[in-house]
Image (tube, rainbow, N blue to C red):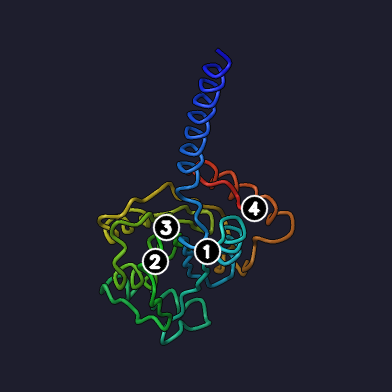
Amino acid sequence: MLYFRFTLLMATLSASSTLYAQEQESESDLQSDDANLIVYLTRTNNTKAVASMIHEAVGGELIELALESPYPEDYESIVSQVDEENETGYLPPLETTIGNIEQYDTIFIGFPTWDMTLPPPMKSFLSEYDLSGKTVIPFNTNGGYGLGSTLEVIEELCAGCQILEAFETKGGLERDGILLAIKNERQEEVEADVLAWLESIGYSALR
């Protein structure tokens, strides 16, 4: 009788342990440190600030996109150039190269809203690399005008990807001379929002 009870107890514990392991595995599907890549484009460092928060929370590799021919520093000049690139469909060549992109399962892509759409350099990245079969997670900073058509462009360029809910927050407004806005108290607010968003899409901070 004692042997039967012991056997039953061990079977129950084993089943519970297996169920717990399955739950933990499910919760950590999006949390494998080595499988995360965070790629971002920044001009006023607001998107960089959010990228750093995500990196601190989930780990992985953090890469800033750079162009072979950088954009001009002058605001009006870059607005004119980006507008022309969007009209013609020109994709500026990237200086940044990622030779091991196949090793990543999840790719966070960060960008500001330019001309109410996805910036040309991020279009270059999504056009250059085959991300089919991967999970793509957008995050965005903007001057208060929202995401524009960025998500529609991402869906078009990321055929075959699983695209999760995007994060967006207000950053600077270069036109008005407001550059890095995500700092001090605002940085703390955005960090709390980032952590809440990560949890909502299936991440728990690794830190």
Q: Which mark is residue 101?
A: none
Q: Is residue 6 above or below residue 20?
A: above
| Residue closest to the eye, 133 or 125 | 133
Mark nearer the N terminus (1 vs 4): 1
Residue visible at 29% across and 70% down in the picture: 127
Evaluate whether residue 5 shows in this view.
Answer: yes
Question: Which type of secondary structure does the marked residue at label 1 adopt?
Answer: loop
In the picture of the structure, the residue carrying the numbered disc 4 is: 191
Rendered location of residue 128, percent (x, y):
30, 73
Residue visible at 43% across and 65% down in the picture: 114
The quadrant of the picture occupied by the N terminus is top right
In the picture of the structure, the residue carrying the numbered disc 3 is: 106
- Type of the residue with mark 1: Gly
Distance between the Cα atoms at labels 4 and 2?
28 Å
Q: Residues within 10 Å of mark 2 (few under 14, many from 20)?
A: few
Rendered location of residue 207, percent (x, y):
65, 54
> Left or right: where does residue 186 sit relative to residue 122?
right
**Tags 1 and 3 in contact by the CB under 8 Å rule?**
yes
Mark nearer the N terminus (4 vs 2): 2
Rendered location of residue 5, percent (x, y):
55, 16
Question: Which type of secondary structure does the marked residue at label 3 adopt?
Answer: strand
Q: Is residue 58 above or below residue 123?
A: above
| Residue closest to the eye, 18 or 26 | 18
- Type of the residue with mark 2: Gln
Distance between the Cα atoms at labels 1 and 2?
11 Å
Q: Which mark is residue 103?
A: 2
In the picture of the structure, the residue carrying the numbered disc 1 is: 60
| Residue closest to the eye, 76 or 134 | 134
Distance between the Cα atoms at labels 1 and 4?
18 Å
Evaluate whether residue 112 shows in this view.
Answer: no
Quarter holding residue 52: bottom right
- Type of the residue with mark 3: Thr
